[in-house]
Amino acid sequence: MVFPYEFHIALDGNGLNGLEGRAGVCVFRYNPQTDDYNFDIKFYDGMAGGHAISISPDRRTGFLGSTAQHLMFYDTATLQELSRISTLRFEATDSSIKGSTHAVWLNNSQVIVTIGNGLWQFDLNNPEQPVRLCDHGLKVPHALKMTASRRYLVYGGMDHPVLGEGCEVGIFDLETRTTKRVVLPTTCWHVVCDPVTDKFYALSFRVQPQDGHNYHEWSIAQFKEYAYEIDAATGTVVRHWATGQDTHAHVNSDVCLSDQELIYCNGASGTIMMIDRKSLSSYRILDARPDFFSRLGATRQRLRTILDSLTRGSIFTHGHQHLRAILVSRGAFLDSVYGCQLSANQGLLFTANRGLNSITIYNYPANTVKFTVKMPSLQEFDQTLHWWSDPRLGFHHSILLSPQQPDATPPSL
């Protein structure tokens, strides 16, 4: 059976906090002509905090980014581990969530990642001799992307557990080997690059620290949200979009572009936001909030979500934060879509729903459901789990391999 599409998704296991979970990969293969599919799932012992996938231009090697200070490479055909490197041997970090969560491939063997306070270049043919390019300049760097000209590496930043709110993105000029820190009104974890120009978009990721200072175990902030269009060459905000707190656009994950829209999923709000790129004003929302019967079928996930939320803060002293989370999730008590990628022909939108443990493919731009499949429970991969345990595999960031076209842009960029 021929499967033109391969949807690779990072897995962090069950529970609410993906930064502290397991580490694995799911590859979902799909034929849109027949709706045939298959998948492989693998969790890797000795790793934690599986977060994001990046794949080499020749599509043979995958990188599983994590929050636990590892670089891990796998065979995209078999999911077998090829190489694992502890980044602590090269540079220390001041936080356990400050890991190499994302990577950018320069070619089939060389990647750029963040380690500690630096940007590092690794060659898989000589992994013992990495090159430290420079300081990245951010508190906790996160998503990495390469701009269209391949001159600029741009990256988002997280809030630091001790140093506080990020409110910044970074730009690294590969020609001059210099970095630029762009100060913003809000923290932005995730970025995406324009396919033609050296502009990129950064999305606000707004949270509140527990006890007023703990950004390690944050809660959802029901604040207004932003999307910034930034020129990488000058480091200036060209335009920006803002929306009120009642818009369901909180806690975003994957972000991608069509010719017309900026598309990103929101795991807390249960939506996929689509902002018109021409005006950077109007928008539409694909609502992925589960209906009553779907929520009823996800009782174990909902109970685990409530339990994990209560362990982060007392309902008596932090009741306002629990209420905000309920309002943001619209009473679902369940996280939603974290993987969201558009096919190269812009006809299919692949999504991975963490809370429902399912994959749904939409017809784009109509946003009608083409195909959906319930994925296996975590119990199938860990026999020590009880049947009543949270069955989520833990879908997080994803990447989609579409049918290859002549001179196509490498999928990891």
Image (spheres, rainbow, N blue to C red):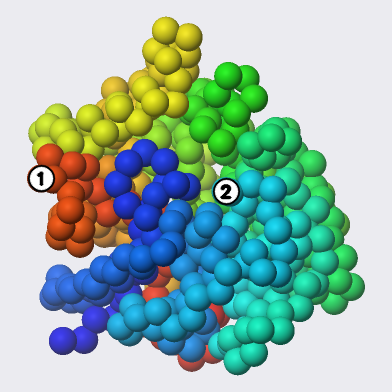
Question: In front here: 6 or 263?
Answer: 6
Residue designated by label 1: 387
Residue at 78% x, 72% y: name it. 132
Q: Is residue 390 visible?
A: yes
Q: Where in the figure is residue 326, as x and y percent of width and height?
A: 36, 21
User: Which quarter of the picture shows residue 342?
Assistant: bottom left
Q: How far is the residue under mark 1 from the one under mark 2? A: 30 Å
Question: In front here: 336 or 402?
Answer: 336
Residue at 36% x, 39% y: name it. 16
Q: Tell me which amino acid carries mark 1.
A: Trp
Q: Quadrant of the N terminus?
A: bottom left
Q: Secondary structure at mark 2?
A: loop
Q: Tell me which amino acid carries mark 2.
A: Ile
Residue designated by label 2: 97
Q: Where in the figure is residue 358, as x and y percent of width and height?
A: 22, 53
Q: Secondary structure at mark 1?
A: loop
Q: Earlier in the sequence, mark 1 or mark 2?
A: 2
